[in-house]
Image (cartoon, helix red, strand yellow):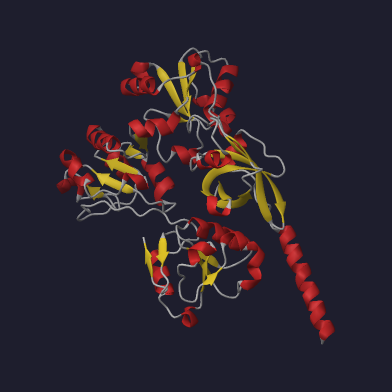
């Protein structure tokens, strides 16, 4: 019997090894990074997500996944465009979403960053660039009167989320397949833009256009981020459907048509807005800090929608777009239409981060007797924090010790992580998910007192 059990264990281990060998390798770089860069061994390229100073850790987003890396403040090298007072200051100065390259070593499944290089701004000569003011003047005139051709070098999914009015999508990764979009006149003013000062796609498009013989080529180097802070963008009905509805990405749709007309047919979830009372609408509007995508609709995508959108931008909202062609274009595309009363107040709930648990569900679990939960609540705060109080029945393992103490964590039960702010809890989530645990995390701030009682933000 013992021999049979040993044989079964060996076969199971062999099967696991084969499954691991067959598992597809995780890409070391975000898809958008691969358009301009190659990634060497023991390197990662992606978007900086968060810094957790208490555990000397950072998170890097690579498309839909998150990499967790440790760092040693005494040895890690941080390269930033501007000098910083210290390593810690340099790391804290990296903006969320900024592109970075990380070199690392790996031991016992733990990656430790040895170098964090922040992508610097692209350098172009002054005569090769166009300013925001210049682009605004041209867009106001339109391509025929302004005698220009404006191209968005970003991949199609980004273009569909909103673009500068009058722009045509000519993605840099597919530039060579789309040269027919370029004007026949090679002396015409051609302007490219992409995702901002550090993005190489529009400068790359400029170089390709010059090789084709175009002589009056420029780059709007500040790109879509700068435009969005000062003016509304546009998107088509097909783009709205593909970028938001099909992906179930939350957004706010404002219908600026007369209410009596809008009730005869409107887009699902649309909120009615009186163009003369935008200030009143904004009093109860989702906070600009949430960065809600907003699409403004009128009958034809004309002056009314543009005026409402401009008021929102002026109030500090980014990611505001006007629906090209308005509601008529939506109907012409045979897209879904509803009738009846429109909502009068806009709401916006951001898409939950992968693996997160709602405050309501966590509260219900935490208030259930530990023996009846069927779930392990894992407190990953440091000991100087947990000495002031922990949730009843919670297992305490400080996040920096987690990988070395996995044996204490049962694998036959779901695990829910929490810390004090949600940041280290999310980091623990990614570490445990990588190890095969059924795990979620609380993204909210939580305060626990010595009686085990708690409050959630």
In this view of the protein, which residue sits in the foreground, 166 or 132? Answer: 132
Q: Quadrant of the C terminus?
A: bottom left
- Classify 53 as above or below 221: below
Q: Quadrant of the N terminus?
A: bottom right
Which residue is pictured at 53% across the width and 31% down the height? Answer: 199
In this view of the protein, which residue sits in the foreground, 271 or 407? Answer: 407
Which residue is pictured at 15% across the width and 38% down the height? Answer: 276
In this view of the protein, which residue sits in the foreground, 280 or 190? Answer: 280
Residue 212 visible (yes or no): no
Q: Position of residue 369 (x, y in %)?
A: 44, 80
Which residue is pictured at 39% across the width and 72% down the height? Answer: 453
- Classify 370 as above or below 111: below
- Classify 269 as above or below 231: below
Q: Position of residue 228 (x, y in %)?
A: 37, 34
Quadrant hosting residue 36 = top right
Q: Residue furthest right?
A: 3
In this image, 1 relative to 156: left or right?
right
Q: Position of residue 56 (x, y in %)?
A: 58, 51
Q: How many marks?
A: 0
Which residue is pictured at 78% across the width and 76% down the height? Answer: 9
In this image, 378 relative to 73: left or right?
left
Quadrant hosting residue 448 = bottom left
């Amino acid at each position: 019997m013992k021999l049979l059990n040993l044989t079964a264990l060996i076969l199971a281990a062999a099967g696991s090894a084969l499954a691991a060998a067959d598992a597809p390798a995780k890409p070391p770089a975000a898809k958008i990074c691969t358009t301009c860069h190659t990634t060497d061994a023991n390197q990662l390229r992606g978007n900086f997500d968060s810094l957790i100073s208490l555990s000397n850790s950072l998170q890097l987003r690579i498309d839909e996944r998150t990499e967790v890396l440790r760092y040693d403040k005494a040895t890690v090298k941080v390269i930033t465009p501007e000098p910083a007072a210290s390593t810690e200051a340099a790391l804290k100065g990296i903006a969320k979403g900024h592109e970075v390259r990380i070199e690392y070593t790996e031991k016992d499944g733990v990656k430790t960053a040895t170098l964090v290089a922040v992508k610097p701004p692209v350098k172009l000569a002054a005569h090769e660039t166009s300013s925001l003011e210049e682009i605004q003047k041209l867009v106001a005139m339109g391509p025929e009167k302004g005698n220009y051709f404006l191209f968005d070098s970003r991949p199609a999914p980004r273009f569909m989320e909103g673009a500068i009015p009058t722009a045509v999508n000519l993605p840099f990764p597919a530039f060579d397949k789309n040269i027919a979009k370029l004007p026949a006149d090679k002396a015409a003013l051609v302007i490219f833009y992409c995702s901002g000062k550090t993005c190489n796609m529009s400068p790359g498009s400029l170089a390709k256009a010059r090789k084709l013989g175009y002589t009056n080529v420029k780059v709007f180097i500040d790109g879509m981020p700068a435009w969005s802070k000062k003016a509304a963008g546009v998107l088509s009905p097909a783009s709205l459907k593909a970028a938001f509805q099909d992906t179930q990405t939350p957004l706010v749709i404002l219908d600026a048509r007369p209410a009596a007309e809008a009730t005869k047919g409107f887009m699902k979830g649309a909120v009615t807005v009186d163009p003369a009372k935008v200030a009143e609408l904004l009093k109860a509007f989702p906070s600009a800090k949430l960065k809600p995508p907003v699409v403004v609709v009128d009958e034809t995508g004309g002056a009314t929608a543009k005026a409402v959108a401009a008021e929102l931008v002026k109030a500090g909202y980014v990611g505001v777009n006007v629906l090209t062609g308005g509601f008529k274009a939506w109907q012409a595309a045979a897209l879904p239409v509803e009738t009846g009363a429109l909502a009068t107040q806009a709401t916006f709930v951001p898409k939950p981060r992968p693996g997160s648990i709602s405050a309501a569900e966590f509260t219900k679990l935490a208030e259930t007797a530990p023996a009846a939960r069927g779930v392990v609540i894992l407190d990953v705060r440091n000991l100087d924090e947990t000495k002031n109080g922990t949730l009843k029945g919670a297992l305490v393992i400080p996040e920096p010790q987690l990988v070395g103490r996995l044996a204490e964590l049962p694998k036959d039960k779901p695990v829910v992580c929490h810390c004090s702010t949600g940041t280290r809890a999310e980091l623990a989530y990614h570490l445990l998910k990588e190890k095969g645990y059924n795990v979620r995390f609380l993204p909210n701030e939580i305060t626990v007192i010595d009686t085990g009682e708690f409050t959630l933000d």
